[in-house]
Amino acid sequence: MRRPAGTKRSALPVVAAFTLAVLFSAGCSGGDDTSAYGDPTLSPSATEVTESPTPSLTPPYPTGAPGCHDNKGWTTAESVDWVKLDVDTPKQNSGSGDLEFSSIPGYLGPLCHKITVQVEFWKLVYGVADGDDGESLSDGSRPDYYFDIRRVKRVEVRADADRERRIALPESLYADDRSPCVGALLTVTVGKPLKSKELPKEVEVGGTQDVWGTETVEFRSKRVADYELSEPSAPQVCSPDGRPTADPADVPPPSAEPTGLYPTDLYPSPSYSWDLEDILRSPTP
């Protein structure tokens, strides 16, 4: 469960937010309890009204007698749920530029047993699909773009919410002047580093977003606790091997086009041939 950007919360190498709110109504007495209680002048029909006890907030990960939350024997799903509350991505962090692991005693633990978390940064290189070669998307259609994905940085964290910590983004990958064909994907994963078979096969460009404005990415793994996608700025001008071929201002972008992972035996390929019309064509809606 995530929090809105910029708020503090309660529980894959940046951070989700959690908001806990309780709405309750207190009971109301029928008069002045001090003067009415035990007053012999009360009529026989009068009834005593007592206030209901005020509900108390129960932290999702309260600390026990040892001063930590016992997470011994947690399943992967339980660890993932906790990490979702513990970590904030750069966008959720009000644009601070870092990924942050939070520390809120009583609400995030601290945990009695540390959880191994992988923070991974991936470089996505997009190219316009060249003809009908390559794999189909999950809906059977041909993609307008392919992407190649490569890990550029990995940080392993032993997390238990004992203190706050920050992880900086790789500057070269998130530079303002990066190629319009390059995107970035940040993943926060419980356990071991992500394997290729767990990575997404499709990523939309200008696709759907969740309520926090995060672009939706479907992973083939249940170990991913959080992620953040930074899209390429102009994939519509990229050649099949991921190089810009035109000024983005001269080629209008599509509204939302899914992409497929480029087959490893085809990308990048020095044997491609194409004509100028194919390179500069606008993707089919």
Image (cartoon, helix red, strand yellow):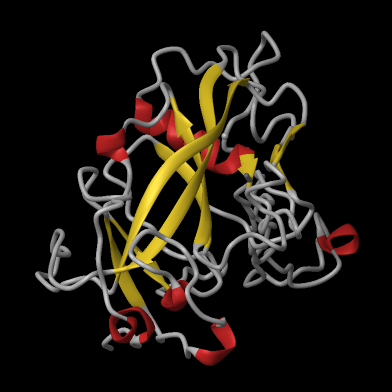
Q: Residue at x 62, y 40 (%)?
A: 87
Residue 185 coordinates in the image, percent (x, y):
50, 50
Q: Residue at x 22, y 50 (%)?
A: 266
279 left or right of 69 in image: left
Residue 11 visible in the shown view: no
Q: Residue at x 30, y 35 (%)?
A: 196
Query: How many discs appear?
Result: 0
158 left or right of 276 in image: right
Single out the residue that lies furthest toward the top: 66
Single out the residue that lies furthest toward the left: 140
Q: Is residue 123 above or below residue 119?
A: below
Residue 66 coordinates in the image, percent (x, y):
67, 8
209 left or right of 278 in image: right
Q: Nearer the viewer, residue 226 or 244?
A: 244
Q: Which quadrant would residue 95 be assigned to in this image? A: bottom right
Single out the residue that lies furthest toward the right: 35
Q: Is residue 159 above or below residue 284?
A: above
Residue 261 coordinates in the image, percent (x, y):
27, 54
